[in-house]
Amino acid sequence: MQPMPLPHFLMMLLAVIAAAGLTIFLAVQSGLSLAVLGLGALIGACLIRMLARVE
């Protein structure tokens, strides 16, 4: 497997940071608490982890 080229990695990193910023911005604008947003992200991560578990 070949390593990812640096420009592709940097664009992917920029996209992830922009998506996170947009999510936080929209949550604050809609009046959603950051604690609720964090709890939702934690529950979502747990569900994905449990569904992708391979033993």
Image (spheres, helix red, strand yellow):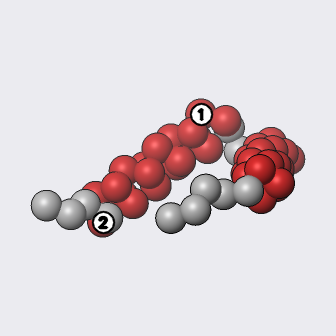
In the rendered structure, which amino acid carries the disc numbered 1? Ala
Q: As rendered, which of 37 and 13 lies closer to the eye?
A: 13
- From the viewer's perspective, is residue 6 above or below residue 2? above
Quadrant of the rendered image containing residue 37: top right
Which mark is drawn over residue 25? none
Q: Is residue 39 left or right of residue 14?
A: left
Identify the residue shown where x is 61% and y is 56%.
3
Identify the residue shown where x is 30% and y is 65%.
51
- From the viewer's perspective, is residue 52 above or below residue 26? below
Q: As rendered, which of 23 and 49 lies closer to the eye?
A: 49
Label 1 vs label 2, nearer the camera: 2
Q: Residues within 10 Å of mark 1 (few under 14, many from 20)?
A: few
Residue 1 spot, x, y in % from top left: 50, 64
Disc 2 target residue? 51
Question: Which sits earlier in the primary sequence, circle 1 or circle 2?
Answer: 1
Helix, strand or loop at mark 2: helix
Residue 22 spot, x, y in % from top left: 82, 51
Q: Is residue 42 left or right of residue 13?
A: left
Pick the quarter of the image with the C terminus.
bottom left
Helix, strand or loop at mark 1: helix
Q: Residues within 10 Å of mark 2 (few under 14, many from 20)?
A: few
Identify the residue shown where x is 44% and y is 51%.
45
Q: Which residue, as the protein is rendered here, is positioned at the far left?
A: 55
Circles 1, 2 touching at the beta carbon (< 8 Å): no
In the rendered structure, which amino acid carries the disc numbered 2? Leu
Residue 27 in sight from this viewpoint: no
Which mark is drawn over residue 35? 1
Q: As rendered, which of 14 and 18 lies closer to the eye?
A: 14
- From the viewer's perspective, is residue 44 above or below residue 34? below
